[in-house]
Image (tube, rainbow, N blue to C red):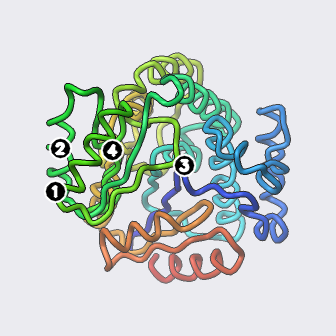
Protein backbone atom coordinates (compact mmCIF):
# COMPACT_ATOMS: atom_id res chain seq x y z
CA UNK A 1 0.00 0.00 0.00
CA UNK A 2 1.03 3.60 -0.67
CA UNK A 3 0.61 6.31 1.98
CA UNK A 4 0.75 10.08 2.31
CA UNK A 5 0.87 12.77 4.97
CA UNK A 6 -0.93 16.06 4.33
CA UNK A 7 -0.45 19.36 6.15
CA UNK A 8 -3.19 21.99 6.73
CA UNK A 9 -3.14 25.69 5.94
CA UNK A 10 -4.69 28.82 7.40
CA UNK A 11 -8.07 28.32 9.02
CA UNK A 12 -6.95 25.28 11.02
CA UNK A 13 -5.50 27.36 13.85
CA UNK A 14 -7.28 27.80 17.18
CA UNK A 15 -6.36 29.02 20.65
CA UNK A 16 -5.37 25.95 22.65
CA UNK A 17 -4.30 23.89 19.64
CA UNK A 18 -1.92 21.04 20.52
CA UNK A 19 -2.45 21.51 24.27
CA UNK A 20 -3.01 17.77 24.78
CA UNK A 21 -0.12 16.90 22.49
CA UNK A 22 2.24 19.25 24.36
CA UNK A 23 1.28 17.65 27.67
CA UNK A 24 2.02 14.20 26.25
CA UNK A 25 5.13 14.77 24.12
CA UNK A 26 8.07 17.06 25.07
CA UNK A 27 8.97 17.31 21.37
CA UNK A 28 6.01 19.63 20.86
CA UNK A 29 7.27 22.16 23.40
CA UNK A 30 10.81 21.86 22.07
CA UNK A 31 9.63 22.62 18.55
CA UNK A 32 7.72 25.69 19.73
CA UNK A 33 10.77 26.86 21.69
CA UNK A 34 12.86 26.63 18.54
CA UNK A 35 10.32 28.69 16.58
CA UNK A 36 10.07 31.24 19.39
CA UNK A 37 13.81 31.75 19.20
CA UNK A 38 13.48 32.66 15.54
CA UNK A 39 10.44 34.90 16.00
CA UNK A 40 11.52 36.70 19.16
CA UNK A 41 8.30 36.05 21.09
CA UNK A 42 6.73 33.14 22.99
CA UNK A 43 4.77 31.37 20.26
CA UNK A 44 3.65 28.54 22.55
CA UNK A 45 2.14 30.99 25.04
CA UNK A 46 0.27 32.80 22.26
CA UNK A 47 -1.12 29.55 20.88
CA UNK A 48 -2.06 28.38 24.36
CA UNK A 49 -3.79 31.53 25.61
CA UNK A 50 -4.40 33.81 22.64
CA UNK A 51 -5.93 36.27 22.17
CA UNK A 52 -7.56 34.81 19.05
CA UNK A 53 -7.31 38.16 17.25
CA UNK A 54 -3.53 38.04 17.54
CA UNK A 55 -3.25 34.36 16.58
CA UNK A 56 -5.46 34.97 13.54
CA UNK A 57 -3.23 37.76 12.21
CA UNK A 58 -1.74 36.21 9.11
CA UNK A 59 1.91 36.96 9.94
CA UNK A 60 1.39 35.15 13.27
CA UNK A 61 -0.92 32.40 12.01
CA UNK A 62 1.54 31.19 9.41
CA UNK A 63 4.51 30.44 11.69
CA UNK A 64 2.12 29.09 14.34
CA UNK A 65 0.59 26.54 11.97
CA UNK A 66 3.94 25.60 10.47
CA UNK A 67 5.35 25.00 13.95
CA UNK A 68 2.33 22.98 15.10
CA UNK A 69 2.47 20.81 12.00
CA UNK A 70 6.23 20.22 12.18
CA UNK A 71 5.88 19.38 15.89
CA UNK A 72 3.38 16.64 15.05
CA UNK A 73 5.60 15.41 12.22
CA UNK A 74 8.47 15.09 14.69
CA UNK A 75 6.22 13.20 17.10
CA UNK A 76 5.12 10.95 14.22
CA UNK A 77 8.74 10.08 13.53
CA UNK A 78 9.59 9.66 17.22
CA UNK A 79 6.72 7.19 17.63
CA UNK A 80 8.02 5.13 14.72
CA UNK A 81 5.42 6.27 12.23
CA UNK A 82 6.00 4.85 8.74
CA UNK A 83 7.80 7.09 6.26
CA UNK A 84 5.08 8.22 3.85
CA UNK A 85 5.46 7.77 0.11
CA UNK A 86 4.15 11.28 -0.58
CA UNK A 87 3.65 14.60 1.19
CA UNK A 88 1.33 17.49 0.37
CA UNK A 89 0.20 20.70 2.05
CA UNK A 90 -2.73 23.01 1.49
CA UNK A 91 -1.40 26.51 0.70
CA UNK A 92 0.70 27.45 3.75
CA UNK A 93 0.79 23.73 4.62
CA UNK A 94 3.09 23.18 1.66
CA UNK A 95 5.91 24.74 3.71
CA UNK A 96 5.31 22.15 6.45
CA UNK A 97 5.46 19.39 3.84
CA UNK A 98 8.73 20.79 2.51
CA UNK A 99 10.26 20.78 5.99
CA UNK A 100 9.16 17.17 6.44
CA UNK A 101 10.65 16.27 3.06
CA UNK A 102 14.03 17.76 3.97
CA UNK A 103 13.76 20.56 1.40
CA UNK A 104 13.69 23.38 3.95
CA UNK A 105 15.39 23.82 7.29
CA UNK A 106 12.74 24.33 9.97
CA UNK A 107 14.19 27.54 11.43
CA UNK A 108 14.56 29.06 7.97
CA UNK A 109 11.00 27.98 7.12
CA UNK A 110 9.67 29.75 10.24
CA UNK A 111 11.25 33.00 9.10
CA UNK A 112 10.08 32.43 5.52
CA UNK A 113 6.43 32.02 6.49
CA UNK A 114 6.63 35.00 8.85
CA UNK A 115 7.77 37.07 5.87
CA UNK A 116 5.11 35.42 3.70
CA UNK A 117 2.36 36.34 6.14
CA UNK A 118 3.61 39.90 6.54
CA UNK A 119 3.94 40.32 2.76
CA UNK A 120 0.40 39.04 2.20
CA UNK A 121 -0.96 41.25 4.97
CA UNK A 122 0.50 44.38 3.39
CA UNK A 123 -0.05 43.54 -0.29
CA UNK A 124 -3.61 44.90 -0.34
CA UNK A 125 -5.05 47.86 1.65
CA UNK A 126 -7.42 46.83 4.43
CA UNK A 127 -10.94 46.40 3.07
CA UNK A 128 -9.85 46.32 -0.57
CA UNK A 129 -9.83 42.53 -0.88
CA UNK A 130 -12.16 39.69 0.01
CA UNK A 131 -12.60 35.92 -0.21
CA UNK A 132 -15.76 33.82 -0.38
CA UNK A 133 -16.55 30.11 -0.53
CA UNK A 134 -19.06 28.91 -3.12
CA UNK A 135 -20.69 25.53 -2.55
CA UNK A 136 -22.82 23.61 -5.02
CA UNK A 137 -21.51 24.90 -8.35
CA UNK A 138 -18.92 23.04 -10.41
CA UNK A 139 -15.45 24.45 -10.98
CA UNK A 140 -16.06 25.63 -14.54
CA UNK A 141 -19.23 27.48 -13.53
CA UNK A 142 -17.36 29.43 -10.85
CA UNK A 143 -14.45 30.18 -13.20
CA UNK A 144 -16.93 31.44 -15.80
CA UNK A 145 -18.67 33.72 -13.29
CA UNK A 146 -15.32 35.22 -12.33
CA UNK A 147 -14.40 35.81 -15.96
CA UNK A 148 -17.71 37.60 -16.54
CA UNK A 149 -16.88 40.22 -13.92
CA UNK A 150 -13.19 41.00 -14.44
CA UNK A 151 -14.14 44.50 -15.58
CA UNK A 152 -15.25 45.20 -12.02
CA UNK A 153 -11.86 44.26 -10.56
CA UNK A 154 -9.70 41.24 -9.85
CA UNK A 155 -11.77 38.15 -9.04
CA UNK A 156 -10.48 34.60 -9.44
CA UNK A 157 -11.25 31.04 -8.38
CA UNK A 158 -8.32 30.38 -6.05
CA UNK A 159 -8.98 27.26 -3.95
CA UNK A 160 -10.39 24.13 -5.57
CA UNK A 161 -10.91 22.37 -2.26
CA UNK A 162 -13.33 19.58 -3.19
CA UNK A 163 -15.97 18.90 -5.84
CA UNK A 164 -18.57 21.65 -5.50
CA UNK A 165 -16.44 23.68 -3.07
CA UNK A 166 -14.51 26.55 -4.61
CA UNK A 167 -13.11 29.68 -2.94
CA UNK A 168 -12.88 32.94 -4.86
CA UNK A 169 -10.68 35.94 -4.04
CA UNK A 170 -10.04 39.42 -5.35
CA UNK A 171 -11.22 43.01 -5.16
CA UNK A 172 -14.08 43.51 -2.72
CA UNK A 173 -16.61 44.84 -5.26
CA UNK A 174 -15.84 42.14 -7.82
CA UNK A 175 -16.04 39.33 -5.26
CA UNK A 176 -19.35 40.68 -3.95
CA UNK A 177 -20.76 40.73 -7.50
CA UNK A 178 -19.70 37.12 -8.19
CA UNK A 179 -21.19 36.08 -4.83
CA UNK A 180 -24.49 37.63 -5.90
CA UNK A 181 -24.36 35.90 -9.29
CA UNK A 182 -23.49 32.55 -7.71
CA UNK A 183 -26.65 32.74 -5.62
CA UNK A 184 -28.65 33.53 -8.76
CA UNK A 185 -27.08 30.53 -10.50
CA UNK A 186 -28.25 28.16 -7.76
CA UNK A 187 -25.27 27.77 -5.46
CA UNK A 188 -26.29 25.78 -2.40
CA UNK A 189 -24.36 28.07 -0.10
CA UNK A 190 -22.18 31.15 -0.45
CA UNK A 191 -20.07 32.21 2.51
CA UNK A 192 -17.97 35.37 2.67
CA UNK A 193 -14.81 34.40 4.59
CA UNK A 194 -13.66 36.32 7.63
CA UNK A 195 -10.22 37.12 6.23
CA UNK A 196 -8.61 40.38 5.19
CA UNK A 197 -6.13 38.88 2.73
CA UNK A 198 -7.37 37.77 -0.74
CA UNK A 199 -4.94 34.87 -1.08
CA UNK A 200 -3.73 33.21 -4.29
CA UNK A 201 -5.03 35.85 -6.71
CA UNK A 202 -3.30 38.53 -8.79
CA UNK A 203 -3.60 41.04 -5.93
CA UNK A 204 -0.86 39.02 -4.17
CA UNK A 205 1.75 39.96 -6.81
CA UNK A 206 3.57 42.36 -4.42
CA UNK A 207 3.75 39.55 -1.86
CA UNK A 208 5.05 37.11 -4.48
CA UNK A 209 7.74 39.60 -5.49
CA UNK A 210 8.84 40.00 -1.87
CA UNK A 211 8.87 36.23 -1.39
CA UNK A 212 11.08 35.81 -4.45
CA UNK A 213 13.77 37.76 -2.61
CA UNK A 214 13.24 35.81 0.62
CA UNK A 215 13.38 32.47 -1.18
CA UNK A 216 16.62 33.47 -2.90
CA UNK A 217 18.24 33.80 0.51
CA UNK A 218 17.51 30.27 1.79
CA UNK A 219 18.84 26.85 0.89
CA UNK A 220 16.33 24.54 -0.82
CA UNK A 221 17.31 20.88 -1.11
CA UNK A 222 15.91 18.14 -3.33
CA UNK A 223 12.98 16.42 -1.63
CA UNK A 224 13.74 13.13 0.13
CA UNK A 225 9.98 12.40 -0.07
CA UNK A 226 8.06 13.62 -3.16
CA UNK A 227 5.89 16.66 -2.43
CA UNK A 228 2.67 17.26 -4.37
CA UNK A 229 2.79 21.03 -4.83
CA UNK A 230 -0.29 23.24 -5.11
CA UNK A 231 0.75 24.82 -8.41
CA UNK A 232 1.36 21.56 -10.29
CA UNK A 233 -0.95 19.09 -8.49
CA UNK A 234 1.85 16.62 -9.15
CA UNK A 235 4.84 15.25 -7.27
CA UNK A 236 8.02 17.33 -7.32
CA UNK A 237 11.47 16.49 -5.94
CA UNK A 238 13.79 18.91 -7.77
CA UNK A 239 14.95 21.81 -5.58
CA UNK A 240 14.91 24.40 -8.37
CA UNK A 241 11.35 23.47 -9.37
CA UNK A 242 10.21 23.55 -5.74
CA UNK A 243 11.64 27.04 -5.24
CA UNK A 244 9.98 28.28 -8.45
CA UNK A 245 6.62 26.79 -7.49
CA UNK A 246 6.72 28.49 -4.08
CA UNK A 247 6.92 31.83 -5.87
CA UNK A 248 3.99 31.04 -8.17
CA UNK A 249 1.94 29.57 -5.32
CA UNK A 250 1.05 33.00 -3.95
CA UNK A 251 -0.63 34.10 -7.19
CA UNK A 252 -1.94 30.73 -8.39
CA UNK A 253 -4.90 28.53 -7.37
CA UNK A 254 -4.58 25.80 -4.76
CA UNK A 255 -5.42 22.71 -6.81
CA UNK A 256 -6.31 20.54 -3.84
CA UNK A 257 -8.95 18.36 -5.50
CA UNK A 258 -6.50 17.50 -8.28
CA UNK A 259 -3.73 16.90 -5.74
CA UNK A 260 -5.76 14.35 -3.77
CA UNK A 261 -6.89 12.66 -6.96
CA UNK A 262 -3.28 12.52 -8.11
CA UNK A 263 -2.34 10.77 -4.87
CA UNK A 264 -5.14 8.29 -5.47
CA UNK A 265 -3.80 7.62 -8.96
CA UNK A 266 -0.40 6.85 -7.42
CA UNK A 267 -2.02 4.19 -5.26
CA UNK A 268 -2.40 6.15 -2.02
CA UNK A 269 -5.22 4.61 -0.01
CA UNK A 270 -4.62 6.07 3.44
CA UNK A 271 -3.38 9.45 4.66
CA UNK A 272 -2.75 11.22 7.94
CA UNK A 273 -3.43 14.94 8.45
CA UNK A 274 -0.30 16.19 10.21
CA UNK A 275 -1.41 19.41 11.88
CA UNK A 276 -4.15 21.00 13.97
CA UNK A 277 -7.79 20.20 13.27
CA UNK A 278 -9.30 17.93 10.65
CA UNK A 279 -10.17 20.20 7.72
CA UNK A 280 -8.17 18.15 5.22
CA UNK A 281 -9.62 14.89 6.53
CA UNK A 282 -13.09 16.22 5.75
CA UNK A 283 -12.09 17.41 2.29
CA UNK A 284 -10.52 14.05 1.49
CA UNK A 285 -13.83 12.29 2.15
CA UNK A 286 -15.55 14.65 -0.28
CA UNK A 287 -12.93 14.10 -2.97
CA UNK A 288 -12.43 10.33 -2.70
CA UNK A 289 -14.47 8.30 -0.22
CA UNK A 290 -12.25 5.27 -0.74
CA UNK A 291 -9.25 7.13 0.69
CA UNK A 292 -9.07 7.41 4.46
CA UNK A 293 -7.52 10.50 6.05
CA UNK A 294 -6.89 10.58 9.79
CA UNK A 295 -6.25 13.63 12.03
CA UNK A 296 -3.29 13.58 14.43
CA UNK A 297 -3.66 16.61 16.75
CA UNK A 298 -4.43 14.76 20.00
CA UNK A 299 -2.70 11.67 21.42
CA UNK A 300 -5.83 9.62 20.77
CA UNK A 301 -6.03 10.79 17.16
CA UNK A 302 -2.31 10.21 16.64
CA UNK A 303 -2.61 6.62 17.90
CA UNK A 304 -5.48 5.87 15.52
CA UNK A 305 -3.70 7.54 12.60
CA UNK A 306 -0.52 5.55 13.25
CA UNK A 307 -2.49 2.32 13.33
CA UNK A 308 -4.31 3.16 10.10
CA UNK A 309 -1.19 4.15 8.20
CA UNK A 310 0.81 1.17 9.49
CA UNK A 311 -1.94 -1.13 8.25
CA UNK A 312 -2.02 0.76 4.94
CA UNK A 313 1.75 0.66 4.60
> Quadrant of residue 116 in the image?
top right
Left or right side of 301 for 101: left
Give the foreground label among 1 and 4. Answer: 1
Residue occupying the point 27% across, 40% down: 177
> Quadrant of residue 95 in the image?
top right
Q: Residues within 10 Å of mark 3 (few under 14, many from 20)?
A: some
Residue situated in front as seen by the camera: 189 or 256: 189
Residue occupying the point 52% across, 55% down: 8
Rounded to the nearest angstrom, the CA distance separating label 4 from label 2 is: 10 Å
Residue situated in front as seen by the camera: 32 or 45: 45
Question: Dot 1: what SS?
Answer: loop
Left or right side of 107 for 192: left
Percent position of residue 195, x then y? 52, 43
Give the foreground label among 2 and 1. Answer: 1
Rounded to the nearest angstrom, the CA distance separating label 2 from label 1 is: 9 Å
User: What residue would you read off at disc 4?
Assistant: 168
Rounded to the nearest angstrom, the CA distance separating label 2 from label 3 is: 25 Å
Rounded to the nearest angstrom, the CA distance separating label 1 from label 3 is: 29 Å
User: What residue would you read off at disc 2?
Assistant: 145
Q: Residues within 10 Å of mark 4 (few under 14, many from 20)?
A: many
Percent position of residue 281, x then y? 46, 69
Rounded to the nearest angstrom, the CA distance separating label 4 from label 3 is: 15 Å
Residue 10 shows which numbered tag? Answer: 3
Residue occupying the point 15% across, 50% down: 140
Which of marks 4 and 1 precedes in the sequence? 4
Residue situated in front as seen by the camera: 61 or 98: 61
Q: Are marks 2 and 1 in contact (CB under 8 Å)?
A: yes
Q: Are marks 4 and 2 in contact (CB under 8 Å)?
A: no
Residue occupying the point 32% across, 79% down: 290
User: What residue would you read off at disc 1?
Assistant: 185
Amino acid sequence: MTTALVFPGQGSQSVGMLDEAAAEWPLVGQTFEQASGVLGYDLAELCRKGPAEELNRTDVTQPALLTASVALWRVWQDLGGPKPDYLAGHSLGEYSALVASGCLDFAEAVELVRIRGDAMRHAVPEGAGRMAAILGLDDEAVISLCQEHVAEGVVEAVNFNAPGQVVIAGSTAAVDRVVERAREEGAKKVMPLDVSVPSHCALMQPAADRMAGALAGVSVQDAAIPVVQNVTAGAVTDAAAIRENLYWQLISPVRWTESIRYLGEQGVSVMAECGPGKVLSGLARRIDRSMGCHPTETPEQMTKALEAVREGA
